[in-house]
Image (spheres, rainbow, N blue to C red):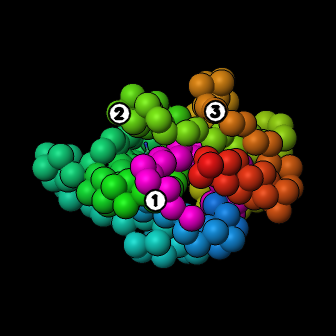
């Protein structure tokens, strides 16, 4: 369902919290929602698809995009760069779409300043122990990266009070329903 103005939704949460799984269910259940696809210099994971999960690009390509003002915001997260391509966002918002940006906390803050009407949803882990377990069990990061992600997670959770909605992910289906309820309230 679209409205006149278009809403930007900032969808955040610490690494390993299950954001992608929640988002996948949410997008499948409401096909009118538009997910923004970010650019990253991170390597592709086995289960990821180019152009769906990210545009996987090189550092020089990323730098070129920054130079050409083609990214709305970007950040360094761990060793890698992540950024939101600008042109599609402008187009979707003018078409009245609800656009979901999967983004870390600093980037969300930058977008909020540019688009004060954007709505923030933060997915919270039931506990730090559960988060660490989930991060380790997915087996996509090495020990150094896991430590860095847990450190970043502490900071992100500490800043989560700036979000409009906090949703604890203790059950994937329930969490997805909660997020859909929030999104559907925004249409009204
Ligand atoms: P991951 O490597 O786990 O896919 O993503 C690492 C972090 O980068 C996550 O918190 C994710 O939300 C964030 N992220 C993904 N795309 C963007 C983006 O375009 N901009 C910013 N600022 N963060 C992003």
Within-10-Å neighbours for mark 3: few <14, some 14–19, many 20+: few
> Horizontally, is 93 left or right of 127 in the view?
left
Q: Earlier in the sequence, mark 3 or mark 1?
A: 1
Instruction: Provide the residue span drawn in magenta.
Output: 1-22
**Residue 38, percent from left and from top:** 40, 57
Q: In this figure, which residue is indicated by the disc labeled 1? A: 97
> Horizontally, is 153 left or right of 116 in the view?
right
Decide whether residue 120 is among the magenta residues: no
Q: Quadrant of residue 22?
A: bottom right
Q: Is residue 60 visible?
A: yes
Q: In this figure, which residue is indicated by the disc labeled 3? A: 164
Residue 126, above or below 88: above
Q: Residue at x 21, y 52 (%)?
A: 70
Q: In this figure, which residue is indicated by the disc labeled 2? A: 114
Q: Nearer the viewer, residue 138 or 54?
A: 54
Residue 42, above or below 151: below
**Residue 63, percent from left and from top:** 20, 49
Q: Secondary structure at mark 2?
A: helix
């Amino acid at each position: 369902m679209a409205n006149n103005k278009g809403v930007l939704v900032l969808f955040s949460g610490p690494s390993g919290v299950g954001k992608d799984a929640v988002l996948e269910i949410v997008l499948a259940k409401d096909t009118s929602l538009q997910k923004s696809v970010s650019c990253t210099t991170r390597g592709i994971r086995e289960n990821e698809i180019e152009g769906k999960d990210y545009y996987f690009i090189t550092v020089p390509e990323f730098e070129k995009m920054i130079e050409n003002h083609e990214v709305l915001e970007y950040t360094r997260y761990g060793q890698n760069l992540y950024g939101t391509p600008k042109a599609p966002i402008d187009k979707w918002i003018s078409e009245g779409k609800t656009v979901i940006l999967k983004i870390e906390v600093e980037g969300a803050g930058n977008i909020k300043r540019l688009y004060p009407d954007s709505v923030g949803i933060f997915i919270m882990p039931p506990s730090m122990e559960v988060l660490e377990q989930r991060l380790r069990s997915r087996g996509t990061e090495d020990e150094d990266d896991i430590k860095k992600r847990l450190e970043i997670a502490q900071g992100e959770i500490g800043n989560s009070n700036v979000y409009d909605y906090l949703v604890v992910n203790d059950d994937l289906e329930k969490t997805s329903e909660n997020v859909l309820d929030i999104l559907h309230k925004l249409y009204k």
